[in-house]
Amino acid sequence: MTLAITHGYVVPVDGDPIEDATVLVADGKIVAVGRDVEIPESATVVDAGGGWVLPGFVEAHGHLGVYEEAEGWAGDDTNEMTDPNGARLRALDAINPADQGFADALSGGVTTAVIKPGSGNPIGGQTVAVKCWGRSVDEMLVKEPVSVKSALGENPKRVYGDQKKLPSTRQGVAAVIRDALMKAQDYKARKAAAEREDKPFDRDGTLEILVRVLDGELPWCQHTHRADDIATALRLAAEFGYRVIINHGTEGHLLADTLAERNVPVIIGPLFTSRSKVELRQRALRNPGILARAGVELAITTDHPVVPIHFLVHQATLAVKEGLDRDTALRSITVNPARIMGIDDRVGALRPGLDGDVVIWSGDPLDVMSRALRVFVSGREVYSYVDGESVVADPYYRESR
């Protein structure tokens, strides 16, 4: 199948905007972007009518499908809070594609989401990147695993403190993480010795994934809000040599120079919630701008469903109002999260070779009055806004729609 989106104000994100341009998608991939694109006779042509054409947005940290909306406990599979070390757990195994949040994502121009376990455990589990439309998570898959989720601060100490077990303090949380990584170092050495001697070796799913972190294969997504917890995150990363990504980073602006110097990216947010706990006292829409001006690579997150995922772009808009550079704001929901999470070979920009995830907007998406009019995932139209109504293609009846 070939799709040509014509007569659009095309914003590739990683290049300059192009007036009256075409995006050509064939077999699910972008093959050309520009003003003089040759359109095959067999192509389906969609006239953007001068609307803004952008890549689908990328949510770098959310809980779509594992924390289902309006389902209560039955749809909450975010945290396995029976083991402080859940490295062997996979968000992939708990995602329900029928969660209403996926339809909401499309209505807000979000076509890819990195779905993570929650922050109840010091080590929560493996994250996964998926498209926001499909019958099963296997069909929606972009990359798995993407990273390993970990948490510092109030959440894990509250969860296990209530159970009267380790960890009930910040030092306990750090100790659980440190112990787990030391065990992984020992496991790696024993496994290497067994392989050299051609001896059988009992595998351990928890330690196998932590070895991949230590080897630099998988980044460590560190839930942390307060500056002292961010410092602990940096200390642990330096001690064990893994790549750390700060998630939330509410007080990251207080250590912005350190984060920039160490090339540690920050996935900041959610930005629309109240200051509901001590860790959030310094939450402010000006913080993304402070981080970006210091040279920190930045992505913005809704932490869906904490903030509804279709408000991702509005968080970027209000961050601009409070000092974030406009271009950086747009990059913070497209190419930056894709690069930070290691999926920029698939999504995040309008560039030949990337997936055909394209959104036609009524105007500048950073204008709160603009809306996503048509959304394409891998070149297939999956969402449209028609006569005041949002229409999502039913993935279970592809042949008849």
Image (cartoon, rainbow, N blue to C red):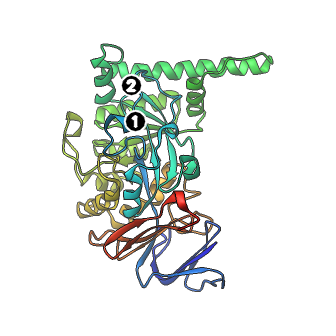
Residue that carries the numbered disc 1 in the rendered image: 78
Residue 118 shown left or right of residue 399 in the figure: left
User: Badge 2 local density, few (<14 within 10 Å), some, or many (20+)?
Assistant: some
Residue at the (40%, 35%) spot, across then down: 78
Q: Count the marks: how many? A: 2
Identify whether 367 is placed above or below 193. below
Q: In the drawing, what numbered circle is on residue 367?
A: none
Question: Which quarter of the image is occupied by the N terminus?
Answer: bottom right
Residue at the (24%, 64%) spot, across then down: 321
Where residue 2 sits in the image (x, y, percent)? 63, 74
Residue that carries the numbered disc 2 in the rendered image: 81
Please indicate, yes or no, whether residue 38 appears anywhere in the rendered image. yes
User: Badge 1 local density, few (<14 within 10 Å), some, or many (20+)?
Assistant: many
Where residue 366 sits in the image (x, y, percent)? 32, 68
**Which residue type carries mark 2?**
Met
Is 261 or 119 nearer to us in this picture? 119
Where residue 179 sits in the image (x, y, percent)? 48, 18
